[in-house]
Amino acid sequence: MQPNASVIYISFGSGGVLSADQITEMAWGLEFSSQRFIWVVHPPSKDGDKGNDISAYLPQGFMARTHDKGLVVTTWAPQMEILAHSSVGGFLSHCGWNSSLESIMNGVPMITWPLYAEQKMVATMLVEELKVAIRSKVLPAKRVVGREEIEMMVRMIVEEKEGDEMRGRAKELKKSGETALSEGGSSFNTLSELAKAVRDQHPTSESWQLHDDRSHWPATRT
């Protein structure tokens, strides 16, 4: 059992891939921080053909030097279970919407690492509006973030007062979210009203089938 809020969890989602140089800097930053970590690693963006042979793209000796503090995962990880564990004190994330919500709903502050699409916008909201996250000085999608800055951010989230303050705000948001989702809460009531409206408009499954003509629906955008 690890101490409370002592582990940093690193994951960039199923589609988030870093360059070989960035993976190297991430590894050194984690090692230099001396913090406990769980790191979900995918092959570098230009070396996917190497599969899950992590020795091909992690610094030599990294696994041996960090075996007592870190866990490297090369397959799927149970993210919800990890974030819900009391030992996890921070989440270094690509800031996908689902991952961000999961982090907030577990009261875990974040290190933002947006890569594409809406992730930069979500990261800005987490840092500037909600104040439950920190970010690097450079945009990770544009430049390599150095090991020294990674070390600094990890230490800040896990060890320093600023990290504790963000953790407190994240836990407050968690409580607000739980209240909204509970019976009588704002989200619960809104979803209940939507469900009632659908039932009132389509009271039977047969009626729903008659009205479920999707030929006039707009094409789905990806």
Image: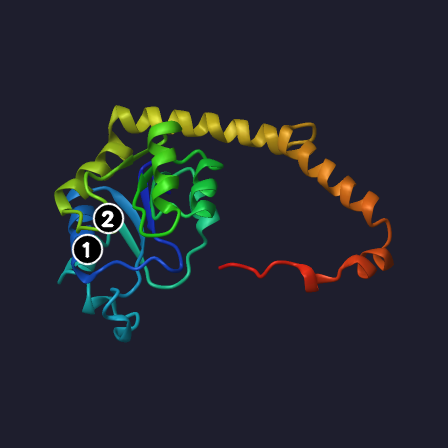
Tell me: 222 left or right of 122.
right
Query: 74 above or below 126?
Result: below
- Structural crowding at the residue carrying mark 1, measured as other residues with C-alpha within 10 Å and reported as few (<14), some (14–19) or many (≥20): some
Foreground of the two, 176 or 40: 176
Tag 2 residue? 140
Numbered marks: total: 2
Q: In the picture, residue 104 is in which quadrant? A: top left
Q: Identify which residue is drawn at 34% across, 29% down.
A: 128
Foreground of the two, 213 or 202: 213
Q: In the picture, residue 33 is in which quadrant? A: top left
Q: Residue furthest bottom?
A: 49
Query: 123 above or below 164?
Result: below
Amino acid type shown at disc 2: Pro
Tag 1 residue? 22
Q: Identify which residue is drawn at 47% across, 25% down.
A: 172
Q: Identify which residue is drawn at 47% across, 37% down.
A: 106
Tell me if I can see residue 139 in this picture.
yes
Percent coordinates x, y for residue 189 in the rendering = 69, 32
Amino acid type shown at disc 1: Gln
Structural distance between the alpha carbons of marks 2 and 1: 9 Å
Percent coordinates x, y for residue 9 in the rendering = 34, 46
Q: Earlier in the sequence, mark 2 or mark 1?
A: 1
Is there a contact, CB below 8 Å, between mark 2 and mark 1?
Answer: yes
Tell me: 129 left or right of 80.
left
Percent coordinates x, y for residue 157 in the rendering = 28, 34
- Structural crowding at the residue carrying mark 2, measured as other residues with C-alpha within 10 Å and reported as few (<14), some (14–19) or many (≥20): many
